[in-house]
Image (tube, grey):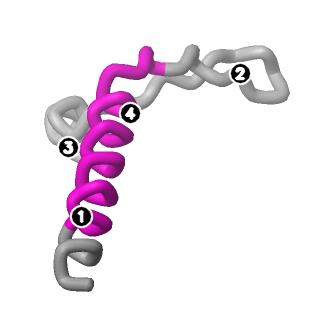
Amino acid sequence: MKKFTIGLLSAAALVTTILLVRQDKEEPSTPKSNSLGETQVPVSLERIRELGL
């Protein structure tokens, strides 16, 4: 029973690792447009600090 539990936890850890790696490799999504047709680009923390916000 102990070996089964260790094996199950190892399998779960492996699957979690694979999913996290695949998530990191995904392409960033295209910027969304609002109702006026303007695209919204995410603002980085550095840019917010530069603007003094």
The residue tagged with tag 2: helix, strand or loop?
Answer: strand
What separation in Å lies between label 1 and label 4 (alpha carbons)?
A: 24 Å
Name the residue beneath numbered marker 2.
33
Q: Looking at this rendering, what residue extends furthest in the right direction?
A: 35
Name the residue beneath numbered marker 4.
23
Nearer the camera: disc 3 or disc 4? 4
What separation in Å lies between label 3 and label 2 (alpha carbons)?
A: 26 Å
Nearer the camera: disc 2 or disc 4? 4
Residue 16 in magenta stretch? yes
Residue type, mark 4 in image: Gln
Verify CB contact (< 8 Å) between mark 2 and mark 4: no
What separation in Å lies between label 3 and label 1 (alpha carbons)?
A: 52 Å
Going from N to C along the chain, the mark reached first, 1 or 4, is 1
Position of residue 46 measured from the top left corner of the image (x, y, whole percent): 16, 34
Name the residue beneath numbered marker 3.
52
Local crowd size for mark 4, using a 10 Å CA cut-off: few (<14), some (14–19), many (≥20) = few
Name the residue beneath numbered marker 1.
7
The residue nearer to you, when weighing 28 against 20, is 20
